[in-house]
């Protein structure tokens, strides 16, 4: 008998460390790679793994995320017999509160589990950039006779203080949880690395229901899986770590290393985006057996044309998304979203440009992130005088300039090229 699997995607975090990119949108709705959103990674992983019944739990600043799910996921023909449904906070907890933690988010929707009666419940976050064959993790869960399986990625022990660390026996059985401890136990047989929790879980349904009800009644709990429920299960349930490094994606070369990035800060987000520029990027978006799915945009192809002085539009070591037009403008080591316009003499270097941005004649942008619908005036410079930029924009400690965009769309019809 085919196992019934129900998935929950936790997409309700504020993403405060990604401010100002999260000023008007939830972190899972932040653009990535030109035409995608961060949430597309976990949803694509589920679909590609044959898991088609998914609830997306939303909360803060959810309009952008809701619109993306509507445009890209709810109506796709692939899901006629299944679903991806966004679910707001149900206020089922004491005091009619928003989600108080990851466990409370599932508890507030516990009726969805009871109605579906799945054999297994998959609970994944929507905050990371990665590709994962979740079917392999599920098979590991079944093979080990586990009641709980936690995805883990080996990292150097010097990073232990940055993660929740899983302590395991030699067979991968979980024996302890250590929250951001510099002296956390290392992987058995590997004294230089620790298992960092990826915040992705598989539960056998009966155990999950029992623990959610018990946790909801515990006034001392913070109602979080990593802090409360999982540590309390040590010695009471069969729990195992799943080593993400063993995960393999169909269609990838045999030597392709699994890719996972926590893009919780502007710097981490910028670095992960820049990874895509490589001729052989660590994150492979070109594997047709494991496509990264997103909204079905109806953009015209990108276009590179001469300006009135005869200068051609150029892009080197860059990603240029559909609907963009480079008219005598030059792009180097950058990522351009949909419908971007570079007017005569404009230049972009080492930057990320979101949808609908317009760079005026002779403008220059370097090591910056331009949010949606930003209009850079003719002759303006961004990223060349950091102290001046600080007077007008958000600038990180490492000097990345983040320019907030305009609400609505930019009227580009009247702009000369």
Image: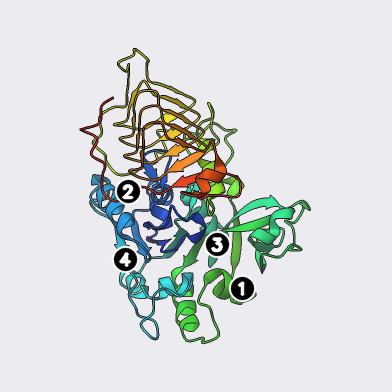
Is 78 situated above or below 321?
A: below
Callout in the foreground (3, 1): 1
Residue wearing tag 1? 231
Is 45 situated above or below 252?
A: below
Of callouts 3 and 4, the N-terminal one: 4
Residue wearing tag 3? 149
Q: From where the camera sits, is residue 131 visible?
A: no
Is 116 situated above or below 21?
A: below
Question: Disc 3 to disc 2, how far (Cα)?
Answer: 43 Å
Of callouts 1 and 4, the N-terminal one: 4
Q: Position of residue 30 (x, y in %)?
A: 41, 50
Instruction: Determine contact: label 3, label 4, CB under 8 Å.
Output: no
Callout in the foreground (1, 2): 2
Callout in the foreground (3, 4): 4
Question: Disc 1 to disc 2, how far (Cα)?
Answer: 45 Å
Which circle marks residue 406 in the picture?
Answer: 2
Of callouts 1 and 2, the N-terminal one: 1
Label 1 SS: helix
Question: Disc 3 to disc 4, how far (Cα)?
Answer: 25 Å
Residue drawn at x 66%, y 51% as measured from the top left: 154
Q: Quadrant of the C terminus?
A: top left
Q: Position of residue 367 (x, y in %)?
A: 52, 37
Q: Quadrant of residue 294?
A: top left
Question: Disc 3 to disc 1, how far (Cα)?
Answer: 13 Å
Which circle marks residue 166 in the picture?
Answer: none
Residue wearing tag 4? 87
């Amino acid at each position: 008998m085919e196992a019934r699997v129900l998935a929950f995607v936790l997409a309700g975090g504020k993403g405060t460390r990604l401010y100002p990119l999260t000023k008007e949108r939830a972190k899972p709705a932040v653009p990535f790679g030109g035409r995608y959103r961060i949430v597309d990674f976990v949803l694509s992983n589920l679909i590609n793994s044959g898991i088609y019944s998914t609830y997306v739990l939303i909360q803060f600043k959810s309009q952008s995320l809701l619109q993306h799910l509507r445009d890209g996921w709810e109506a796709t023909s692939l899901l006629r017999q299944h679903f991806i449904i966004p679910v707001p906070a149900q206020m089922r907890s004491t005091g009619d509160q928003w989600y108080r933690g990851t466990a409370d988010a599932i508890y507030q929707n516990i009726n969805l589990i009871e109605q579906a009666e799945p054999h297994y419940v998959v609970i994944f976050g929507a905050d990371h950039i990665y590709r994962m064959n979740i079917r392999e993790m599920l098979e590991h869960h079944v093979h080990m006779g586990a009641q709980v399986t936690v995805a883990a990625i080996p990292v150097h022990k010097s990073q232990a203080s940055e993660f929740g660390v899983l302590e395991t026996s030699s067979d991968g059985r979980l024996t302890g949880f250590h929250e951001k401890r510099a002296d956390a136990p290392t992987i058995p047989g590997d004294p230089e690395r620790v298992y960092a929790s990826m915040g992705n879980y598989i539960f056998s349904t009966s155990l999950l229901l029992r623990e959610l009800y018990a946790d909801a009644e515990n006034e001392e709990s913070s109602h979080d899986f990593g802090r409360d429920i999982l540590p309390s299960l040590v010695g009471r349930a069969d729990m195992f770590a799943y080593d993400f490094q063993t995960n393999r994606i169909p269609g990838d070369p045999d030597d392709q290393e699994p890719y996972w990035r926590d893009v919780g800060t502007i710097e981490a987000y910028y670095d992960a985006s820049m990874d895509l520029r490589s001729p052989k990027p660590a994150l492979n978006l070109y594997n047709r057996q494991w496509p990264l799915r997103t909204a079905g945009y109806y953009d015209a192809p990108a276009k590179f044309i001469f300006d009135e002085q005869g200068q051609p539009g150029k892009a080197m070591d860059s990603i240029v998304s559909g609907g963009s037009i480079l008219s005598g403008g030059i792009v180097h080591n950058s990522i351009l979203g949909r419908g971007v316009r570079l007017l005569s003499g404009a230049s972009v270097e080492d930057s990320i440009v979101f949808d609908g941005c317009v760079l005026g004649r002779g403008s220059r942008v370097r090591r910056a992130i331009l949010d949606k619908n930003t209009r850079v005036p003719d002759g303006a410079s961004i990223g060349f005088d950091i102290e001046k930029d600080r007077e007008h924009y958000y600038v990180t400690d490492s000097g990345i300039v983040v320019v907030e965009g305009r609400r609505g769309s930019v009227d580009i019809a009247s702009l000369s090229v």
